[in-house]
Image: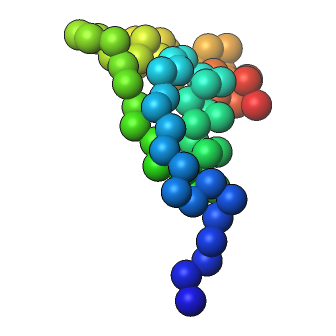
């Protein structure tokens, strides 16, 4: 038997960037949504150019 999720069958276009938006999108995926990530050309999400750690903490950790 397949387990049903709250957002099964929901399709989401994700135009978010950096940390908080993509984190919300990840939560939608975890609850069953199908997500298509749309990024600006040619560089994509600006988080790729940010340092992984600042003052010993990651941006992901700080925004939680």
Tell me which corner region of the image, top left, top right, bottom left or bottom right, holds residue 32: bottom right
Rendered location of residue 62, percent (x, y) = 73, 23
Q: How is the image coloured?
A: rainbow
Is residue 27 or residue 61 the one in the foreground?
27
Rendered location of residue 18, percent (x, y) = 54, 18
- Judge left or right: residue 24 versus residue 35: right
Can the viewer see residue 58? Answer: no
Query: Relative to 10, does residue 59 appear above or below in the rendering?
Result: above
Q: Residue at x 61, y 25 (%)?
A: 21
Query: Relative to 28, does residue 57 appear above or below in the rendering?
Result: above
Image quarter where the C terminus lies is: top right
Task: Name the residue furthest bottom.
Answer: 1
Tell me which corner region of the image, top left, top right, bottom left or bottom right, holds residue 49: top left
Q: Residue at x 48, y 29 (%)?
A: 14
Image quarter where the N terminus lies is: bottom right
- Judge left or right: residue 18 versus residue 35: right
Tell me which corner region of the image, top left, top right, bottom left or bottom right, holds residue 30: bottom right
Rendered location of residue 8, percent (x, y) = 57, 60
Q: Residue at x 64, y 45 (%)?
A: 27
Can the viewer see residue 23? Answer: yes
- Judge left or right: residue 56 versus residue 44: right
Label tally: 0
Query: Relative to 52, does residue 5 appear above or below in the rendering?
Result: below
Rendered location of residue 4, percent (x, y) = 62, 71
Is residue 19 or residue 13 the one in the foreground?
13
Q: Residue at x 34, y 12 (%)?
A: 40
């Amino acid at each position: 038997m397949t387990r049903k999720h709250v957002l099964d069958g929901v399709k989401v276009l994700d135009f978010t960037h950096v940390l908080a938006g993509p984190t919300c999108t990840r939560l939608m995926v975890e609850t069953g949504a199908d997500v298509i990530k749309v990024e600006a050309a040619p560089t994509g999400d600006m988080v790729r150019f940010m340092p992984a750690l600042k003052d010993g903490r990651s941006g992901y950790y700080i925004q939680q």
